[in-house]
Image (spheres, rainbow, N blue to C red):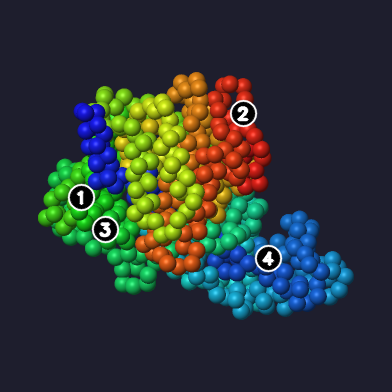
Amino acid sequence: MMMLMKKMRTAARFRSQLWSLKMPSLCHRSFAAISTYKAVIFDMYGVLIPSSVKLATVFEQQNSVPLGTLGRAIRMGGELNAWKRFMRGEIGAEEFVEAFGRQCSEIAGCPVPIGSFLSDLTSGPMTRPLPVMMKAILCARSRGLKTAVLSNNFLQLNGDPFLPLDHSLFDVIVESCREGLSKPDPRIYHLCLNRLGVSAHEAVFLDDLELNVKAAVQLGMHAIKVGDLAVSVKELEGMLGIPLSGFVPGPDSAPWATKLPMDRLTQYLRKALHLSDEADPVAVQQLSPSQSNSLYHLTTGGRHLLLRKQQKTSRAMETEYRLLKSLNGSSIPVPEIIDLCEDPSVLGAPFLLMEVCLGRMFSDHSLPGLTPGDRRALYQAMQHTLCQIHCLDTRAVGLEDYGEPVDYMGLQVQWWTQQYRDSETQPIPAMERLIQWLPLHLPKHQRTTLIHGSFRLENLVFHAEKPEVVAVMDWGRSKLGDPLIDLTFSCMGHYLPQDNPLLTGISDRGLVQLGIPTVEEVMGQYCSSMGLEEGIPDWNFYMAFHLFCLAASHQGESKSTIAGQPGSGRLAEQVADLAWDFATKEGFRIFNAMPRAPHAGTSPLKGKRSKITGAGL
């Protein structure tokens, strides 16, 4: 009877806290890291204004010039050809038109009107900056980042460079025609960095040409090859750890207005941080526009702080405060927690104050701009940190009562089943089968450790230069529970494609070529570190469970946002089908087979090949 009552109390606690393993893409994500990048360097053509490469193709088509003629002429003759001399300012526009026109005509076997092409380069759409990049620049500058243009550019007939941009948006403008150097010559990159006053690893570089991107990477910069502008901005956003699409022009010149009672905040901070009255004034920068959960970056007295304010104290905030206080000083890297202030007279609402963790954060799991060796090292550091969490002696840090994990997975299945029932919009056969199947196939042997609850790349802060995790963020869903929940959740992206609308994956990104460890390697590292000689025999169950949760989450969002619209439940149905495939081991539309112990001499994944699976297998 005592055990039954204990289970009932635990289940009630789960329901009252509404705690779950909800996927990060479906919930608010808070972070406590400020990127170590100090500057963003932009190429002009193809990044800030339309692509000259695409313009050349259109020009060739319209003038009956064989496709690729201009490109061949640009590549011929080495550094002394007319195009490169024009870019370095060694010849003027008239001499360029004559020399380059003659070269193109010889290649094409017909006259090529290069004067017309040069006119096209400096008129029409080429004079209109690309809005998505302009907004990104405004957002970046509003957060204190320096910006620069590094362009292979030319002098017009009037002797001025062609630069149809607002010069005030850039701290530095470096043009090949003025410097006598052109990309990919490393000297022009160094020139730009020196004028910005930053080192290579403190800058992000964007260019639409592969050879220019490679040159930047070789110098130590983090580079983005620009193709699809929206995708590139998203990638930059992930590197910088700030939003780049919310700039609204106005008197504040910032993405969101900062509205805090500065006198009361300053008084509180000086007391909490033991600062003198002569300390530097408090500078505030709002990082999120949420009314219910606002995030601010504070600087004062030479310290960087993160303040998260909520309309009312939530259990997640209390949980995070208690946990971080317990983990400060342990082997697990977490930000230093300073205070949980519940006094409404300070800011009008409760808030959490912690130190900012300087480092790199990534949102794209393919880690663009890094070498294969660097990617592998970062993923290995990620798994090492997960093992540290799961090896923690909870009693030693006072967390032995951090939840009561009685029948942990059983309670999770019950909770998510109820969430699905509460948000059900239409029958989904696979969900009904899973609701029956999951309780009957619960893992027989569940270990109990501290679990993070949302352990993914996005929630980690890495050292600015070394493959080392310096902070694990977003502990609001932590608990004592089954550690395999964390491991299998961290591997979800390995089996989903990049364009998955619910949870972005990397299965179609060529993991082996990228240097990202496959699931076999991830399991091998984890099992070896944790002493799991039998491997993970219940892998299929955990993956079916995660997909079941994902389907239930989407069903809930569909009901609240697009209920009644045709196809609103289709995505949840597709995810549920994948979960059922996993559960029954039939179809294997994502996985080849169930992972087994790596040391056993067999591959953790085996079986039929799948057309959908990637995962670097």
Kindly report which numbered mark, 1 or 2, lies closer to the viewer in this rendering.
2
Gap between marks 4 and 1, in whole Å? 55 Å
Residue type at mark 3: give it.
Ser
Question: Label 2: how many residues lie within 10 Å, few (<14), some (14-19) or many (20+)?
Answer: some
Gap between marks 1 and 3, in whole Å? 11 Å
Gap between marks 2 and 3, in whole Å? 48 Å
Q: Nearer the viewer, residue 597 or 353?
A: 597
As helix, strand or loop, the secondary structure at mark 3 comes to loop
Mark with earlier residue (2, 3): 3
Mark with earlier residue (1, 3): 3
Residue highlighted by disc 1: 313
Residue 38 percent coordinates (x, y): 43, 52
Residue highlighted by disc 3: 292
Relative to 211, residue 328 above or below? above
Mark 2 and mark 4 residues within 8 Å of each other at the beta carbon: no
Gap between marks 3 and 4, in whole Å? 46 Å
Question: Label 3: how many residues lie within 10 Å, few (<14), some (14-19) or many (20+)?
Answer: few
Relative to 599, residue 412 above or below? below
Residue type at mark 4: give it.
Val
Mark 1 and mark 2 residues within 8 Å of each other at the beta carbon: no
